[in-house]
Image: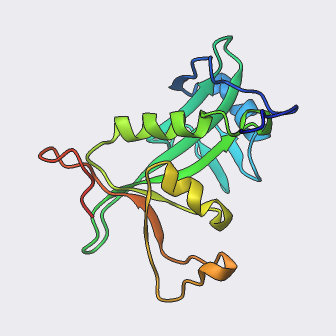
Amino acid sequence: MEQPLRWPFRTLDSMKIRIRDARPADVEWMSVNTEGWKVTEGKGERATSLEEALHALIAEDPHGVRVGWLHSIQRPAYEDEPSYVALYEMHVSPEFRRAGVARALVAELFARVPEQRIVLSAWDRELYDLWLKLGFTYLPDAHDNPDHHAYWGEMLRPPVTAETGEGAA
């Protein structure tokens, strides 16, 4: 039998997670609730900005308490590579982890850009299995060493094709 999560973790099992677009009033909260990134309203050096975002999303509990956020940007086509969406930053408040918040944020991003490839711009290799569970696919690199959590390939969600409803690599 699975043990219930104990404080400081909260469960959102019976609660509905609401996803909405980030607003300027969220910027300070987003900057505090990140792992080293500064969030700004306008473009800034070494900062994630609402202005540059393709989608900046906020996850809230039913009472309007912010519990997580996601920021993506559109990367233009380069040489023979098509354009893609870069999932640039995602953060879930520690007390709400393992409660479906990341899944809700990623599902909303997938729904908003179904026909585009989504690539994690940087990803924590220790969360490899989580990213797979959230719907991403791993494209290996010759230098990978799974025994040491050394994954150098790309973690991505291929575009969903209209014909099959499935990702196309």
Asked if 90 appears above or below 56 in the picture, the reply is below
56 horizontally vs 29: left or right: left
Q: Quadrant of the C terminus?
A: bottom left
143 horizontally vs 24: left or right: left
Closer to the camera in the image, 5 or 134? 5
Asked if 22 appears above or below 169 in the picture, the reply is above
**Residue 116 horizontal/vertical position (percent):** 30, 50
Q: Which residue is drawn at 65% across and 81% down?
A: 147
**Residue 93 horizontal/vertical position (percent):** 75, 36
Q: Which residue is drawn at 60% across and 79% down?
A: 146
38 horizontally vs 135: left or right: right
110 horizontally vs 40: left or right: left
**Residue 57 horizontal/vertical position (percent):** 54, 32
One can see residue 41 in this view: no
Considering every residue shown, the one lying at the far top of the view is: 63
Q: Residue at x 67, y 22 (%)?
A: 25
Q: Quadrant of the N terminus?
A: top right
Asked if 31 appears above or below 140 in the picture, the reply is above
One can see residue 148 in this view: yes
Colour scheme of the picture: rainbow
**Residue 106 horizontal/vertical position (percent):** 49, 41
Which quadrant of the view contains residue 27?
Answer: top right
Closer to the camera in the image, 158 or 1? 1
Q: Residue at x 33, y 55 (%)?
A: 117
Which quadrant of the view contains residue 162?
Answer: top left
